[in-house]
Image: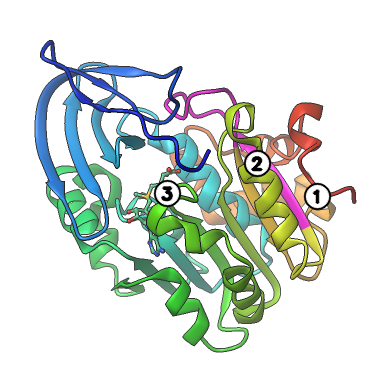
Amino acid sequence: MKGWAVSSGISSEAWFNEALYPDWGQRFKVVKELVHKRSPFQDIRIFESSSHGRVLVLDGIIQITERDEFIYQEMLAHVPLFMHPHPKRVLIIGAGDGGVLRRVLQHKTVEKAVMVEIDGDVIELSKQHLPMFGKDAWDDPRADVIVGDGIDYVKKADDGAFDVIIVDSTDPIGVGDVLFTDDFYKNCARILSDEGIIVNQCGVPFQQADELRETTARRAKFFPHVTAYLAAVPTYVGGFMTLGMAKKGTAPHKLELATLQKRAQESEIAESCQYWTPEVHIASFSLPPYIAQNLPRS
Ligand code: SAM
């Protein structure tokens, strides 16, 4: 969906109209605009809505809302971390609102979580206006938060330095584009350990099928296993959101429900989840044909 430019903003009646698709979209009734700032990288807007609580918008596109963030964040963080046999070192790219960092640090097995976000303003404004996402994760001694470009970080990182990489980025336009390239995935494969897993947002296939198709085809060059799983996120309009997964070592579908249930019990995380469960985890890899057709034949 590269290069579509449609106007977004808050109308005189105080409605925010999202600018993702030129001919279709969602709108939010705005109670109060909290901040609107142009950073060196993008246009940042945070407002209080009457329907979804606080909302973060980058370059006119909805990134996250207080009301449905749990769906996306739980599935982006818990699926790879419960799939990996012993995830200790995690790299998070993007995710400046802090929600993924918090979910990753819920896992007691995690000894180190490095988060690389290109835009320091997103982090500072999220701490100020969206504290409910990161909560105390920012102060966790296991967290190492770096302001920088994700592609530079993966190029410099050591071979096998991480067990799981979570890419919570904007779409493949503007600053996020580099995170959907061969160079990025080649380096991610190099810095992941034997059973290493990378996941990233791959868009809503009903509207953005090329994002899933292109991303998966690229990763298939560097990883033995590529697949995707689903999450139904109301404010990522257009039906299922896909989260792309690439993995080294054992194939993802080999994971048994009983193994997941045991890991969930030991972790004491499931009680805090509103979306992720071992059963939802397994089911989320069952893709309807209109989505599965975008993946390389296995
Ligand atoms: N969940 C949202 C989505 O699916 O659209 C993404 C939310 S998160 C706030 C996206 C973050 O990725 C932004 O804060 C943005 O600054 C960051 N980002 C974009 N390109 C980046 C890059 N090359 N390196 C690191 N962070 C990047």
- Secondary structure beneath dot 2 equals helix
The CA distance from mark 3 to mark 1 is 32 Å
* Side of 281 where 140 appears, left or right: left
Which residue is farthest right? 298
Span highlighted in magenta in the image: 226-241
Assess disc 3: are there few (<14), some (14-19) or many (≥20) residues with their C-alpha within 10 Å of its C-alpha: many
Q: How is the image coloured?
A: rainbow
Three-letter amino acid code of the residue under disc 2: Asp
Q: x and y percent of residue 224 in the render?
A: 82, 66
Residue with the mark numbered 2: 210
Q: Nearer the viewer, mark 3 or mark 2?
A: 2
Three-letter amino acid code of the residue under disc 3: Thr
Name the disc covering residue 256, or none.
1
In this rendering, the answer to whether 267 lies above or below 4 is below
Q: How many marks?
A: 3
Tell me if label 3 and label 1 are in contact, CB under 8 Å. no
Assess disc 2: are there few (<14), some (14-19) or many (≥20) residues with their C-alpha within 10 Å of its C-alpha: some
Q: Nearer the viewer, mark 3 or mark 1?
A: 3
Q: Is mark 3 within 8 Å of ligand 1?
A: yes
The CA distance from mark 3 to mark 2 is 15 Å
Q: Residue 57 in magenta?
A: no
Q: x and y percent of residue 28 in the render?
A: 27, 18
Q: x and y percent of residue 88 in the render?
A: 54, 74
Instruction: Tell me which label, 3 or 2, sits earlier in the chain.
Output: 3
